[in-house]
Each structure stands twice: as structure tokens, then as C-alpha cells.
């Protein structure tokens, strides 16, 4: 049965008769009209005679059966999924590194089982070869001393890390997770374009590609014998867990942090695999053991999947300027208490010039030839090779020999000989003669093309395949598909994401039905309710300060609203002058400016702290805060007086929206406690300072009114006291009344309640933070209105500040 | 020559630092037939929580310290007794330039002493066209590597002015070269960049230098400083030769070696990381004293 006939079920006028089959064939022909593969290039979908390959027929007929509107609607569905999941990447080069939607090319690339078997077999050999090269370069150095590899290529590589020479990995292997970039040449054969051993990224994106693509083409996916990805991730998780030691059972993902272009992937894959997402500041090394700093003390970790270049990993022994690593990690590796995926120094294997020596190294180290060739490469440090490159420059890509970037995504430093040749023949000759050792020539392979949708039509676009491999107890295992890169134009060099290239899912289509049972989710009967692991101190610190800054922003806004609500009649009066003076404590030197960068700076600090917590926050919570920031910017420059007071009202409502989301949605555990403590302390301290300033014995009625307003307690005051404000009623309501959420007492009760539930380092005995919180809470609880003076309020503010330091000492460093 | 060497380094932090970690390269090397390390000690106050010893890739001795608790001062004292033997240079058996290039190309090794490590740019030392041009202008057709090395050393010494205030430890070689002012680190890095610019393998040596008081005066305590000089690879037969461009001499028995590397980054005496917010100041005292009577240590 042909694919076209099978597909009639999805046809709008489903009637399985001959005319239907004809109609389907006509639709398919229509779809492919104008699909013109380039001359001399293999097309994945269309054969040389212009007919679709058998592999693609079912997919294509399903595709052809949809109307254009239907297709559009499906693309939307896929894109919506990605947006809801928060998939994005960061594009460098623009101001601030703009965050972009994930550029999914919706049509998957289809690969046949026999192609895949060849690829997987070839790459297993190659991964083993890379391991052997690594062991030699950091061990005996025979490749250099036997003259198989020029010593200068290694000795002058910035990725050959001298502190790692002599390192013997605990597991016996340097490499556990590698990736390869492949392309198919005009002869239909696959070529390795580059090896990724440093810190291959994108495996998490492959999963997202898959989830999105299956939403777009669910029917074709489900009946198409497409190999699933879950088994690979399950194997990967087992590998990492298998490398842990009994004393330190934790696995961490070492991320450069929120500013990295693939941070989303780090957070995503940490959640998917159940590993800790760590930054350098979360780690410390004591007596050769890497430890996670948590609010419950140091917790040992023995496996780190690093997502940063090795040079940044340890500022003590590698790049001293690195602020994203952790000093001492190399020592922990040498002590045998830590395994890093991959071992630092693996980046040297990505050196472009090494591709020229792969065939010889394979012979020397493994006594066999490469099954899967890599792109033909000539190192111009040798005369014969240099002459060859010069003679064939028009068919070459010429680039830096030490580069570790992939051929088709590199910068200006790689050029096509053809282009230069016509205009500046001598320039190439001269460059090769003077800079030979720093250059490689690589055959400019014409990559195969695959269909992509451009303006509603299918068009051929160049494609490279990325294949991930993990080392398992049974040997290397490849991720079957998931990730291809699609060029934005017919020029293969426009394939990089940073240049408008796109990403597609890859379906490896089996000859027989595939096993779909593997899933990472535990089965129902295995369900165990687990409390979250110990909170890293850095995350706790960000949560604490997020709470403080959100509250401080609110305090500043309330004070400013009071100022602008009065500005017309009393700007020169003593109260507003005192208020203007007081606002300097919030960084506001010019209250007349209203909603200004001075006012919104605090909000910016809150946002900065939140951006480090994206793996712990709901998308809604983040959006609420982000919207608020945008609103504040829009409102900047609102005229002083009433209009500013009203604009501030809008911002304050936005803030309570965020507070509400946190209160309603956040899991009540350690992280929430730190956020809550931060907010409560800031509110207590803000109130105490305002009372010290404006509720002294000499305070006038206007100042007391303002305090009640700033304390958002106007209604409560009216109901509770049935009187005009006086000093006693204000102090009672805003300081001592434990039922008013806007009182100091209420906030100190909260602080005490939450601090008492934090991990006590010494069981049974109160720690310093708990003791201080109790003293503070009880100290106020026993006071009467008559006891309260500006002095006592100032003391409370100071005690809160001291408690903040104590908490930081105990938990946050 | 027999020396007693004392180096003291004090860090003062405006806000107490904690979780401080250091890799120290302060202890003189033990070099077969050239320098004998008789005894040494390295003390730290406050007392470190953790201490470890090792040798880095180039064979330099490292001492690792970790101080966990908050401290506003860190005081390090290194003491060593060293015997330094003189190394007469002998006949110039170094090759001419093209010979050197052939010898390098045929040198198949990535072991620490291989000349391949000491060519091209290194972390703190870029190859700069103006320095290379300067180096090339000094070259004569009849030069051997050694004769050229001596001429370059003399030229750098003559063209640069010693000036302790013109540069800092972070100043790139090109900037110091353009100013024609600097200290031993600048003299050395410029010489290295010049040598590498012509394809001669060159490395950075750190150590201690015995200084002599002005005639008739008594040597003062702690006036010496850590010093830096240069080593260049003069072919298979001569190997590595050390010269001191700051003092226009072949490094000899006044030069006590601590470490060698590609540039300052490989041999920095104190490489440290700590968690603190605020500024700090450093004070360094070095004292190199010749032990007159060769009494056993």
C-alpha cells in the first residue's frame, strides 16, 4: 500500500476509492511543483530523477493532504508549545544579547534506518578514537613523539590544558558525552564536519524540537516507526548516576548562569533529568571534595556535567579571570573525588587542524582505518599540504588551524578560496606562505539539502545533522535524531543559529515498529513524594534579596505617592521637605522627577535576582515582574503631582499581583521561606525607619496621617479607633498591633516563624539567627505605646539589619 | 654561592575575606647541577585549614593554601637556603636561524622542556608587530641564535629605562615597549615577545636576585624584590640559555630560580581567589643574603 492511499483517512472528503488516490497524487505533485534541488547536490527528500524518495512518501502525502491554513495552524501549535515551555535562546551581538524565540523549522529531516546504522557504527569508532587521542595527549604523548601529530599543534593550542597533563580520570575515561556534526556530500555519503567534545550543547533543545514537531505532525510521527529519544536520556542519566561515589551521590550541571545563550537548556535539562543546576558560586572544594553550598551546610557532589568551556572551570589553575568557575575543582578531579563530563582539556580534540590527522591517528592508535570519513583537511604547516591547498584554493575553505568552531558556523576568519581567488590570487598565496602553520584548508563540501517551509512553500535548504552520544556500560549509544540545522539560504555558511539559521527535528525511521515504552517519568506505582533537595545558598540569597527589593520598591513607591498626592499645595512645607530628605535613603534625590530611573532602580535589582531563579519560578511569576518593569518604563516621565500619584497606584497594584502569585503558587519550603523572610524584614525595617523619622513626640497630625497612608492602613485606622489620627493610635496600629499585616509586630512574627523553621545547624539548640529573631519579636511584643520613641524605632531597624547579617553568615554564603 | 632567602607577603583586606585559596610559587627550585635547594619553609598566618604541595606542568613547586574563616590580614613567609652553582657559557655552538627552524621542526615532543611550548602567543603575551619589527632590525646575516640573543638583551637594556612607577603587573608588553619604561617583568616580556616574533622559543623565569649595596654601604634588610628574566632555546646542542635583560647579563650565580613558564601567568608568585567584597592592599618584602662561610645547613 502506498503512502498516498494510506493517508486518505485524514483527507477532508475521506472516501477510499480510486479517484481519492488520484486526488492525493495530484495534491502531492502540486506540493512539489517548484521544489528544485540544486545541481550537483544531494537532496534528502527528492532523488536525482525529481521523484520523492520512498522514505518520505508517507510524510509528504500527509503534508499534502492538509490545506495551507491547516498547516499554518499546526505550525502555530508547535510554536505555541515552545513559547509556553519558555524555550528561547540568546542571540549575541545585539544590545544586551536579545532573547529570541526558538527558530524551529517545522518540517523534520527524515533519515533511513540503513543510513542511521552506518552513522552510528562510524561514530562509535570515532568516539573511541577521540578517547584514545585524549588519553595520549594528556598521558604518554606518543602521537607527538612518534611524529604522527605535529607537536606544535598541541603545544600551541589554547585548549590543551597543561594542568590536566598526567590526570588519570577516576572512571578510566576522559569522555562520556560527545556530539558530532555531519553532512552528506554530493555522492550521498556522510562526512563528519566536526567533533564536539568540550561541552556539547543542544541535547535539551533536541527534546524540545521533538515535542514541538510531534505536535505539528502527530499522525505521521505516530505511524512512522520513528525512533524515540527517551531511551537515550535514560541511558545518559544512568551513566552520570553510575559515576557518583557512595559518599557523594549527587550529580550537578555546572552552568555559566543566566546570561549564557543556552541557559534555558541547562535549566530545562536539569529539571528533566533531576540533577542540580549549579553555578560556580554554588561550589566549594574542601580537602579534595567538591561541595555544594546549601542552606543546610555543605553537601558533597561527585559528578559535574559542565556546560562551560574548561578554561573557566577553575580560576586558581586555569583562566584566572573567570568569575563563573569554582577554585579548586581541578584539585578535586586529581584527588579522584570528582568526575567532570567531559574532563577539562577535551576541547583540544575540537581543534580544526586535528581533522587532517584523524586517519593516521586512527591507524596508529587502533590499527584500523576510519569507517566514517571526516571532511578532507590539509594543515598548511607542511609544505606538500600547503602547496596542495594553494593549487586547489578554489575548492577550499581556508581558516585558522587552531579554531574550535565548526566549519559552517565560523566567523569572518574562514573564507572560501573560490571567492578570494578571482580577485586576490596573490593574497591567498602570500597568506599561505607566511601564516601556513596557522591555517588549514578544508574541502568546501556541498551539503545536502532538505525541505523547509519558506513563505508557505517547500524549498530545499542545506542541512547538517548533529548526533549526540553517551558512553554506557555497553559502549557508546547515539541519540537517534532530534537535531539538524537548516541554512537560511542556499549558501551552506548561513547555517549557524546566530546567522538566521534554523533548527529541525530529525526522525530516524525504522524498518520495523519501534519500542515506544521507555519514558523517564516514573510509573504510578513507583511514586514517591520527595521534599526538594537542600537549597543552594546562592539561590536562597537571590530569593532573600528578591523579597527585600520587591518590598523596598513598594516602600519607595508608597512614599513617593504620598509625596505627589500632596505636592500641589504643600511642596514647600516642612513635612514634604522632610519626606524629600527621607527619600534619599531610597536613592531618590529628586522626588519631583516622579517615576524616574532613580525610583525604578530597585525594581531592576529585584528583576536581576529573579533572573537567576528561572528554574524555580513559574513563568507567570516571572512575567508579572517583567510586565511591571515594562510598565514602569512606559510610565517614566509622567507629570508630577496627581498624575504621578495615580501612575504609582498602577505600579503598586502590579506589585501586589506579583506578591499574590508568589503567595498562591509557590511551594512552601525553604526557598519560599527565604523570600518571605526577605520581604517581612524589609517591611519591618522600612516601617521602623519611617516611624523613627515621622512619629516622634513632636510629630504633627499631617505626618501621622501620612504614616497611616504609607502604611496602607487608612481604612483600618478609621474602623479601629473612630478618631482622628494621634501619635498613640498610629504607633499602636503600625507598630504593635499583631493583627495588622502592615505592622512591625506582624512582620516580626512572620520573620520568627520562618526563621525558626530553617535548618538548625545544631539540632536541639537554637542558632544565632533564631535567637536574634526571637529576641526581636518578643522585645516588641512586650512594649506599650508609651515605651516607643524615635530611639526605640531606630533600634528595631538596626536589629533587623543585624539579623540580616546573621542570616547571611549562617545560610547565604 | 650559598644564599638565605626570605620573602614576606602581606595582604590587608578592607572587609574581612573568607574562603581564600592560594597557589604559591615562591620556593626556589631544585635544579640538577645548577641549583640545590637545601631547606625551605613556608608559613601562613592565620594558620590554613588546608595545605597541599605539588609540582605544576613545568615542574615548578606549588604550595596550595586554603583559609576558610574570615580574616582581614594574611601574612605569608617563605624562607629557604639555596646553593647556586655558576654556569660558564662555553663556546657558542648554537645554530644559525634556519638551522634552528629545522631543529624545532624535527623536535617531536610535548614534554615540559620541549621548545614548542614557548613559541607563539601565550595567555599574557601576544605577538606584536612593532616588537617583532624591532627584533628583526637587530638581526645580522651572520648571527647564531646565541649571538643574536646577547645583542637583543643588550638592546632591550639600552633602549628601556628602569622605572618602578611606569607600569603594573597587568601592563601588556606592547604598552611598556611603547613607553620604553618598565620593570624586570616588562623588560623580560618584551624580550620574549621579540624572540618569539622571530621564531625563537623563549620563556619567562621568576626568581630571586642577589643585589649588592652601593660601595661602602651596608646591605639593608628587605630591599630586594622578586625578579624576572628570560630563557631562550638555542638549539639542540646548547639547549636553554637564561639572560637577564634588566641587567644586561647572562643569568648566573646571582639568579636564584623559582619557576619557569610561558609568561607571568605560569609562574605568578601568588595566585589567589577569595570571597570578599572590597579592596585589598599587598606588601612584599624580599631579602637575599649570601652566606659567607659555607657552613653546612
Image: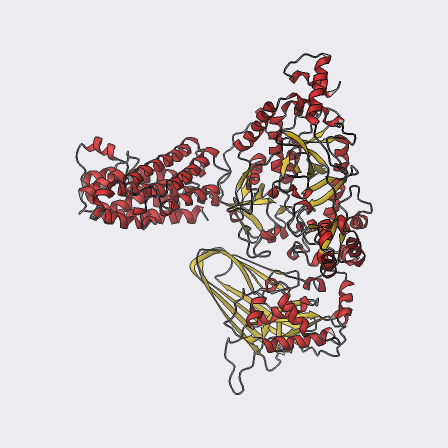
**At 51% from the left edge and 73% from the top edge, which residue is drawn?**
B164
A762 or B248: nearer the viewer? B248
Q: Position of residue A50 (x, y in %)?
A: 76, 29
**At 46% from the left edge and 49% from the top edge, which residue is drawn?**
A813
* Residue B137 vertical position relative to residue A38 in the rendered view, above or below: below
Q: Is residue A269 left or right of residue B69?
A: right
**At 78% from the left edge and 56% from the top edge, which residue is drawn?**
A386
Q: Which residue is outermost to the bottom?
A: B216
Q: Position of residue A463 (x, y in %)?
A: 69, 38
Colour scheme: secondary structure
Q: Quadrant of the N terminus of chain A?
A: top right
* Residue A447 vertical position relative to residue A11 in the rendered view, above or below: below
Q: Position of residue A661 (x, y in %)?
A: 41, 32
Q: Which residue is outermost to the front?
A: A423
Q: Work out whether residue B187 can be spotted.
A: yes
Q: Position of residue A415 (x, y in %)?
A: 69, 50
Image quadrant assignment for residue A144: bottom right
A74 or A576: nearer the viewer? A74
Image quadrant assignment for residue A452: top right
Q: Work out whether residue A792 can be spotted.
A: no
Q: Is residue A85 left or right of residue B245?
A: left
Q: Is residue A370 left or right of residue A562?
A: right
Q: Is residue B277 left or right of residue A91?
A: left
| Number of dots carrying numbers | 0
Amino acid at each position: 500500500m502506498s503512502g498516498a492511499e494510506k493517508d486518505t483517512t485524514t483527507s477532508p472528503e475521506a472516501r477510499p476509492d480510486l479517484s481519492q488516490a488520484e486526488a492525493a497524487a495530484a495534491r502531492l505533485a502540486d506540493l512539489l511543483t517548484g521544489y528544485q534541488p540544486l545541481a550537483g547536490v544531494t537532496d534528502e527528500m527528492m532523488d536525482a530523477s525529481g521523484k520523492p524518495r520512498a522514505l518520505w512518501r508517507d510524510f509528504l502525502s500527509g503534508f499534502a493532504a492538509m490545506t495551507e491554513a491547516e498547516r499554518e495552524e499546526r505550525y502555530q501549535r508547535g510554536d505555541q508549545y515552545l513559547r509556553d515551555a519558555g524555550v528561547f535562546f540568546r542571540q549575541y551581538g545585539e544590545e544586551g544579547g536579545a532573547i529570541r524565540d526558538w527558530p524551529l523549522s517545522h518540517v523534520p529531516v527524515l533519515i533511513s534506518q540503513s543510513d542511521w546504522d552506518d552513522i552510528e557504527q562510524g561514530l562509535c569508532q570515532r568516539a573511541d578514537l577521540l578517547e584514545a587521542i585524549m588519553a595520549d595527549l594528556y598521558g604518554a604523548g606518543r602521537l607527538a613523539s612518534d611524529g604522527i601529530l605535529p607537536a606544535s599543534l598541541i603545544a600551541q593550542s589554547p585548549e590543551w590544558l597543561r594542568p590536566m597533563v598526567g590526570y588519570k580520570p577516576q572512571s578510566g575515561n576522559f569522555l562520556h558525552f560527545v556530539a558530532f556534526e555531519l553532512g552528506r556530500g554530493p555522492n550521498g555519503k556522510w562526512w563528519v564536519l566536526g567533533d564536539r567534545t568540550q561541552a556539547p550543547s543542544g541535547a535539551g533543545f533536541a527534546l524540545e524540537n521533538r515535542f514541538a514537531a510531534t505536535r505539528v505532525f502527530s499522525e505521521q510521527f505516530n505511524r512512522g516507526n520513528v525512533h524515540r529519544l527517551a531511551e537515550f536520556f535514560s541511558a545518559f542519566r544512568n551513566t552520570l548516576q553510575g559515576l557518583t561515589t557512595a559518599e557523594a551521590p549527587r550529580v550537578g550541571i555546572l552552568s555559566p548562569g543566566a546570561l549564557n545563550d543556552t541557559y534555558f537548556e541547562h535549566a530545562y535539562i536539569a529539571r528533566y533529568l533531576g540533577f542540580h543546576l549549579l553555578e560556580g558560586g554554588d561550589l566549594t572544594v574542601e580537602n579534595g571534595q567538591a561541595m555544594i553550598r546549601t542552606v543546610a551546610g555543605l553537601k558533597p557532589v561527585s559528578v559535574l556535567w559542565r556546560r562551560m568551556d574548561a578554561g573557566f572551570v577553575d580560576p586558581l589553575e586555569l583562566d584566572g579571570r573567570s568569575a563563573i568557575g569554582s577554585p579548586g575543582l581541578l584539585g578535586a578531579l586529581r584527588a579522584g573525588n570528582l568526575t567532570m563530563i567531559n574532563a577539562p582539556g577535551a576541547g583540544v580534540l575540537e581543534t580544526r587542524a586535528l581533522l587532517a590527522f584523524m586517519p593516521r591517528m586512527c591507524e596508529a592508535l587502533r590499527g584500523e582505518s576510519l569507517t566514517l570519513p571526516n571532511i578532507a583537511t590539509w594543515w598548511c604547516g607542511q609544505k606538500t599540504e600547503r602547496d596542495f591547498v594553494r593549487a586547489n584554493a578554489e575548492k577550499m575553505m581556508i581558516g585558522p588551524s587552531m579554531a574550535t568552531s565548526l566549519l559552517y558556523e565560523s566567523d569572518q576568519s574562514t573564507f572560501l578560496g573560490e571567492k578570494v581567488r578571482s580577485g586576490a590570487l596573490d593574497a591567498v598565496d602570500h597568506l599561505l606562505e607566511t601564516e601556513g602553520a596557522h591555517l588549514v584548508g578544508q574541502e568546501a563540501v556541498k551539503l545536502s539539502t532538505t525541505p523547509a517551509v519558506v513563505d508557505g512553500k517547500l524549498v530545499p535548504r542545506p542541512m547538517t545533522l548533529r548526533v549526540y552520544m553517551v558512553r554506557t556500560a555497553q559502549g557508546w549509544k547515539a541519540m537517534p535524531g532530534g537535531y539538524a540545522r537548516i541554512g537560511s539560504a542556499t549558501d551552506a555558511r548561513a547555517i549557524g543559529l546566530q546567522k538566521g539559521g534554523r533548527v529541525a527535528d530529525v526522525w530516524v525511521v525504522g524498518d520495523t515498529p519501534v519500542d515506544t515504552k521507555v519514558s523517564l517519568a516514573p510509573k504510578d506505582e513507583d511514586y514517591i513524594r520527595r521534599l526538594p533537595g537542600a537549597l543552594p545558598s546562592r539561590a536562597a540569597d537571590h530569593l532573600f534579596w528578591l523579597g527585600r527589593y520587591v518590598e523596598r520598591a513598594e516602600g519607595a513607591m508608597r512614599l513617593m505617592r504620598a509625596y505627589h498626592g500632596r505636592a500641589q499645595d504643600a511642596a514647600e512645607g516642612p513635612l514634604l521637605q522632610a519626606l524629600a530628605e527621607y527619600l534619599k535613603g531610597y536613592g531618590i534625590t529628586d522626588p519631583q522627577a516622579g517615576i524616574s530611573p532613580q525610583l525604578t532602580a530597585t525594581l531592576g535589582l529585584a528583576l536581576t535576582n529573579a533572573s537567576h531563579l528561572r528554574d524555580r519560578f513559574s513563568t507567570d511569576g516571572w512575567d508579572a515582574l517583567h510586565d511591571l518593569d515594562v510598565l514602569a518604563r512606559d510610565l517614566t516621565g509622567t507629570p508630577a503631582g496627581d498624575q504621578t500619584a495615580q501612575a504609582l497606584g498602577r505600579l503598586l497594584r502590579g506589585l501586589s499581583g506579583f506578591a499574590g502569585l508568589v503567595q498562591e503558587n509557590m511551594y512552601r519550603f525553604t526557598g519560599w521561606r527565604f523570600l518571605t523572610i526577605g520581604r517581612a524584614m524589609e517591611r519591618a525595617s522600612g516601617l521602623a525607619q519611617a516611624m523613627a523619622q515621622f512619629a516622634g513626640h513632636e510629630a504633627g497630625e499631617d505626618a501621622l496621617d501620612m504614616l497611616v497612608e504609607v502604611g496602607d492602613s487608612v481604612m483600618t485606622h478609621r474602623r479601629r479607633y473612630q478618631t482622628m489620627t494621634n501619635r498613640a493610635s498610629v504607633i499602636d496600629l503600625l507598630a504593635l498591633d499583631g493583627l495588622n499585616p502592615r505592622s512591625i509586630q506582624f512582620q516580626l512574627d512572620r520573620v520568627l516563624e520562618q526563621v525558626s523553621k530553617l535548618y538548625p545547624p545544631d539540632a536541639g539548640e537554637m542558632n544565632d539567627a533564631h535567637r536574634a529573631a526571637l529576641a526581636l519579636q518578643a522585645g516588641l511584643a512586650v512594649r506599650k505605646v508609651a515605651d516607643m520613641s524615635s530611639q526605640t524605632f531606630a533600634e528595631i531597624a538596626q536589629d533587623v539589619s543585624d539579623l540580616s547579617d546573621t542570616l547571611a553568615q549562617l545560610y547565604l554564603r | 654561592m650559598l644564599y638565605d632567602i626570605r620573602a614576606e607577603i602581606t595582604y590587608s583586606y578592607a572587609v574581612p575575606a573568607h574562603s581564600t585559596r592560594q597557589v604559591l610559587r615562591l620556593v626556589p627550585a631544585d635544579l640538577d647541577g645548577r641549583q640545590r635547594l637545601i631547606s625551605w619553609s613556608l608559613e601562613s598566618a592565620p594558620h590554613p585549614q588546608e595545605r597541599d604541595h605539588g609540582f605544576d606542568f613545568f615542574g615548578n613547586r606549588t604550595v596550595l593554601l586554603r583559609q576558610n574563616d574570615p580574616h582581614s590580614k594574611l601574612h605569608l613567609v617563605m624562607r629557604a637556603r639555596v646553593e647556586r652553582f655558576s654556569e660558564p657559557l662555553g663556546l657558542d655552538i648554537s645554530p644559525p636561524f634556519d638551522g634552528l627552524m629545522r631543529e624545532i621542526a624535527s623536535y617531536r615532543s610535548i614534554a615540559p622542556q620541549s621548545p614548542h611550548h614557548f613559541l607563539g602567543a601565550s595567555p599574557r603575551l601576544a605577538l606584536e608587530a612593532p616588537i617583532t619589527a624591532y627584533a628583526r632590525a637587530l638581526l645580522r646575516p651572520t648571527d647564531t641564535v646565541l649571538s643574536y640573543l646577547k645583542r637583543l638583551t643588550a638592546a632591550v637594556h639600552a633602549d628601556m629605562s628602569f622605572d618602578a612607577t611606569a607600569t603594573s603587573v597587568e601592563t601588556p608588553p606592547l604598552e611598556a615597549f611603547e613607553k620604553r619604561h618598565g620593570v624586570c617583568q616588562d623588560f623580560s616580556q618584551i624580550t620574549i615577545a621579540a624572540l618569539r616574533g622571530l621564531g625563537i622559543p623563549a620563556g619567562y623565569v621568576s626568581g630571586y636576585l642577589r643585589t649588592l649595596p652601593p660601595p661602602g654601604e651596608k646591605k639593608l634588610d628587605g630591599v630586594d624584590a622578586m625578579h624576572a628574566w628570560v630563557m631562550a632555546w638555542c638549539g639542540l646542542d646548547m639547549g636553554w640559555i637564561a639572560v637577564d635583560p634588566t641587567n644586561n647579563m647572562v643569568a648566573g650565580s646571582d639568579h636564584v630560580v623559582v619557576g619557569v613558564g610561558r609568561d607571568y601567568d605560569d609562574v605568578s608568585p601568588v595566585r589567589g581567589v577569595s570571597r570578599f567584597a572590597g579592596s585589598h592592599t599587598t606588601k612584599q618584602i624580599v631579602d637575599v643574603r649570601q652566606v659567607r662561610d659555607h657552613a653546612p645547613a
